[in-house]
Image (cartoon, rainbow, N blue to C red):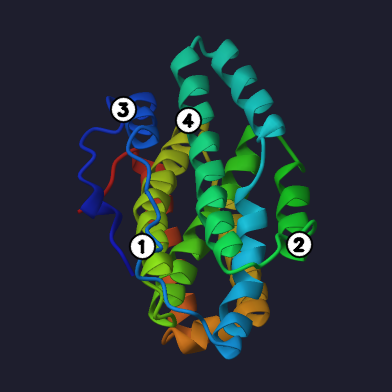
Amino acid sequence: MISLSTLSLGDLSQFDWTACFEHNHHHRLQVDFSKEPELTLQEKRLIFPSIQSFQKGEASEGAFLLRCAKRYADSHQAPEYLEAMKGFVREENQHSGYLKKYMDYHHIPVRSRSFLDSIFRLLRKTGGLKSEIIVLVTAEMIALSYYRALAECTVSPALKSICRQMLKDELLHIAFQSYTLHKLKSCPLEILLRILLMEITMTVVWLSMKNVFLAGGYSYRRLAADCLGYLNQSIKITESGTISS
């Protein structure tokens, strides 16, 4: 498990999220295929079904999320929050772009639909901004373990570089969304619901992508320990508004 304290963001209440996302936008990963090997059919069968699912999940205009963010920004006189959220959505789309570029190189088609993505989108729209954020941050915490496993089960230098970029960005996203939940205020019942959501979601993801996790050195126990560990870090930010060392 990666500690969020490695981000060294300082005082989250003073951190300029908009500038951070803008900086990332101008320093995007340039995927290098110059040393990319030809993948075997077995390797393709192992990694691409899950990559297709994650690529679909990262691709969204975020219209509902941005509407919720605008309502919050307007009611709290916080236009900077809406701008930061726009930067977040743009970065998620960049992630989708990285994966699509990798799929295109290996002639793998994108999926028009994904069962997991459909479930996540449905859950995100069950309420307002808080529901959106809770589901999003849950998916991002599971993505940390997925991209670590994916990097370990491939010889592809291009895919390894994409995974490193994803890990770096998703850590920041978790801190951003957890701090948003701090500002939105949470009650003990919501904490319990977050734990339940994580336990259900990580189990579904495990069952759907078990081969990748196993090939990347993950047992279900390790996946659960990592995901619940990330959730514990997120909850601490939600409660205190700071990242514990």
At label 2, which amino acid type do we have? Ser
Between circles 3 and 4, the one closer to the viewer is 4
Element type where label 2 sits in the image: loop
Residue indicated by mark 4: 87
Element type where label 1 sits in the image: helix
12 versus 140 height, above or below: above
At label 3, which amino acid type do we have? Ser
Residue indicated by mark 1: 161
Q: CA distance from mark 2 to mark 1?
A: 25 Å
Q: Residues within 10 Å of mark 1 (few under 14, many from 20)?
A: some
Task: Point out residue 151 in the picture as x, y percentages from the top left corner.
Answer: 40, 73
Q: Is residue 219 visible?
A: no
Between residue 153 and residue 131, name the one nearer to us.
153
Q: CA distance from mark 3 to mark 4?
A: 18 Å
Q: Residues within 10 Å of mark 3 (few under 14, many from 20)?
A: few
Residue indicated by mark 2: 114
Task: Point out residue 122 in the picture as x, y percentages from the top left corner.
Answer: 78, 49
Between residue 190 and residue 57, name the one nearer to us.
57
Residue 103 placement: quadrant: bottom right
On residue 147, the disc is: none
